[in-house]
Amino acid sequence: MLSEQGDSAMDRARAVQAKLSRRFPSFVKLMRVSHVSEQFRLCLPKLFCDEHLPKHDGVIVLLDENHKWYNGRYSVERYELTGGWRCFSTDNKLLEGDFLVFQLIELCKFKVYIVKNTRLTKVNDANRDHFHRKPVKEEEEEENSDPIEVTRDKYLEHLSRKKERSIPVRKPARDEYAYYSDRFGTKRSSEYSLVRFKDVKGFKDFRMYVDGQILDSEIPTRCRAKYYELCKSQNMFLHEKLVRGLNGKLAAGMISETVKIADAIRAVNSMTCPARMDGWDKTLKGFEELGMVVGFLRVRIRKLLRVFREFRDEIDLKRIERDEAEKEMRALNAKIGKIDAEIDALSGKNEPVFKEIACAPW
């Protein structure tokens, strides 16, 4: 059971939640031993998950008050968060008895507010690795108080004095993100990707997410390796700007087709039909309208088409010259035939003269 001081921490957590915008759903979670030590497994409220989170396993991003983000693995069957949750817990020095306020600011992304239960306990050095607490004397409270907690309380007190702002009508996802960016000072470098490409050290760390859904199982390893090289060439996930709500299999199909087109571009030669290249460009244009970053491939196709057309113009000129030469050759052949006929005629005309002279009496 929580003591009266513990109840005070819960009240402060509820106060934090009450100050949050109702546009974004939230819940309060008490930290227990299993949440902050050993297994580091955080169970989320079932009703909240059923109503607001995806119906499949995936990645959930946790954003702390210092704007540092963590990728946690979410199990829809157990309503459980693992993986990056351990790093979040240790980095923020969470202890048993702390309260966390989770605010769902985006699909599969929580802003987390931490309310320390500083009045209840302090860390036991002997058990520091296990993140347990032990009771402390009342006079030690001020000495061991958390300066961050004091700042938070002052901030909440300041908010309580301010007149509550009217809540604007909720608009589509783009405006929602702009509201979130203004509130927390974040930058929209990759709205739909849950992992930054600059954090990927190699193909082994390369994972593809669309709206929190992992696409790796939908794409063969060889195709993923080629797609990784394409992303690496642009230093970004080519799918990170895909529109929201896109079907995972459709996204995987777009990625596979992009890789096939890239391979086909590499195999282009002077005999490649330009109509095929036009078809690739139209396909990539459709992908681009859905958010795929494939402009660099379209640029390469246009360069190939331009070079092909330049060579084709030169070839057409040479073909015209050849046709004209063949025409002249046909005229010359006709003239030669006429001359040969005249020669034969002259030879037949002079033959009797030669016979007469040759056969004359001596």
Image (cartoon, rainbow, N blue to C red):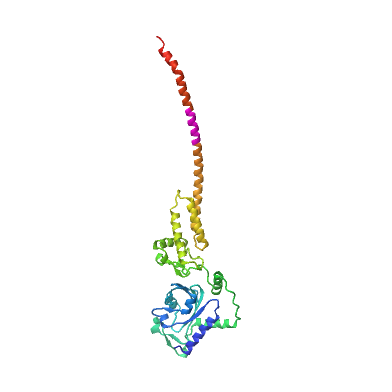
Q: Looking at the picture, how far across and down is residue 221, in whole percent?
A: 39, 63
The quarter of the rendered structure image containing the N terminus is bottom left
Q: How many marks?
A: 0
- Most foreground residue, 99 or 334: 334
- Most foreground residue, 27 or 162: 27
Q: Looking at the picture, how far across and down is residue 168, in whole percent?
A: 59, 75
Q: Residue at x 44, y 18 (%)?
A: 351
The answer to whether residue 141 shows anywhere in this view is no
The answer to whether residue 273 shows anywhere in this view is yes
Q: Residue at x 45, y 90 (%)?
A: 137
- Most foreground residue, 117 or 273: 273
Q: Residue at x 46, y 23 (%)?
A: 343
Relative side of 91 to 16, left or right: left
Residue 16 within the segment the image draws in magenta = no
Relative side of 14 to 214, left or right: right
Name the residue furthest top: 362
Q: Looking at the picture, how far across and down is residue 298, in whole percent?
A: 50, 56
Give the residues in magenta. 326-337
The quarter of the rendered structure image containing the C terminus is top left
- Most foreground residue, 37 or 304: 304
Quadrant hosting residue 352: top left
Quadrant hosting residue 357: top left
Q: Main secondary structure of the magenta part?
A: helix
- 139 up-or-down from 252: above or below: below
Q: Looking at the picture, how far across and down is residue 79, in whole percent?
A: 44, 77
